[in-house]
Amino acid sequence: MPRRAYSYLRFSSKQQSKGDSVRRQMTFADDLCKEHGWALDDSLTLQDLGVSAFRGKNKEAGALAQFLEAVKSGRVCSGSVLIVESLDRLSRQDVDEAYETVRNLLKAGITIATREPRRVYTPEQRNDMLNILEWLFIAARAHEESAVKSMRGREEWDQRRKRARSEGRPYGGRCAAWMRLTPEGYALIPERAEAVRMIFKMACEGMGGWRIARWLQDRSEQYPPFGPSGVWVEEYVRMILRHRATVGEFQPKRRDEGGKIVQEGQPIPGYSPAVVSEEEWFAAQSAVRGRRLRSGRPGEKEVNLFTGMLFHARGGDRLSCKSQRAGRAEKKRYPYLAAYQKGGCCGAGQRFRYEPFEAGIIRTVVELRTKDVVPPQPEEEAR
């Protein structure tokens, strides 16, 4: 049986996908397998395209992490070959981390074949001093290159942030989906800006994110969706309502030493064209917070006048209104009040018809007199 070989492709920037990197790495893997008689196994998709190895993201959650787990679990058996263009494709972390990645693979019985330099490192060679020195040299050079690029990149972005604060110049090419970058700066896209204004208008009128998204989706020809999903969804509507870019504000961000994105300084007001005013933004936030005091979503086939007000007396589960057919032969749907909360003492079978309950409550309310619900005045109590 020929030895199984796995090709691992990685490059740091998505812009590199436009170049020759992928073709070059794939061609090398094919040629090497033909040369040594290995069988290239493509059952594992080992591609970290646009994933940096400087902080070990590919080893923590990328395709390389999947390969290491497959080696550990025995999915990739000892004696297999891992083909990479260079050892720095595996790691650009500091020397200790990079060397440990290579050594652990060799200790697991995995042969590593590289193009630059043209080498085949076998598990039996893991204690060879010349190989160790070569690995350490490659790791040190790769880490230093990435560290220099990272430093220069941070300096460049620092200058961009300073120019954004002092001159109002665009921070980068990316912007909110309702804007575009022009030679003069950011400009609103009219039809998208109109959709954002409508979202704020409906939110101020008391509509929730789900109803707003549904309303816009029903009128998608008038308000074409521009979110990543291609349709109007509740979460994207809520994101727009929270986004301070709608009032023209921008919050610069940066990566800390651990690679986490954090805020950099105070927000920049007036950075881009505002879609809504500050008053409209705060009014929408107030309306959203007010809705949190209420619960439940309007039913599609039933209406519940007591949403969020009724609870099961024994278990405390919230009662919600659900419609259900009276029988298989019946076409009419009847609404029921029932407790469906998981873990409660009330089962789905403990339900009662909504319509008689509503009629009884309304009949009782109609019979109430003013003095039954209004607290007595001090002079009346004295009598």
Image (cartoon, grey):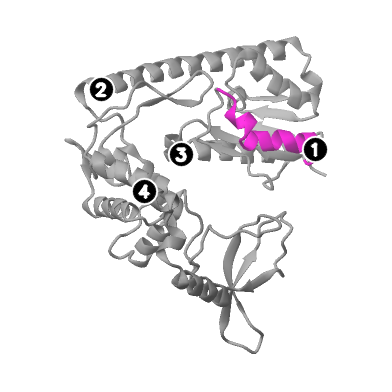
- Image location of residue 185, percent across then percent down: 20, 35
| Left-right relation of 64 to 110 | left
> Which is nearer the N-term, disc 3 or disc 2?
3
Between the C-alphas of marks 1 and 2, the distance is 52 Å
Dot 2, crowdedness within 10 Å: few (<14), some or many (≥20)? some
Between the C-alphas of marks 4 and 1, the distance is 52 Å
> Which is nearer the N-term, disc 4 or disc 3?
3
The stretch of residues the image draws in magenta is: 55-75
> Which is nearer the N-term, disc 1 or disc 2?
1
Dot 4, crowdedness within 10 Å: few (<14), some or many (≥20)? some
- The residue tagged 3 is 17
Quadrant in the picture for residue 340: bottom right
- The residue tagged 2 is 165
Residue depth check, mark 2 versus mark 4: number of the one nearer the observer: 4
Report the residue at 50% width, 26% height from top.
Answer: 260
Between the C-alphas of marks 2 and 4, the distance is 32 Å
| Left-right relation of 243 to 325 | left
- The residue tagged 1 is 73
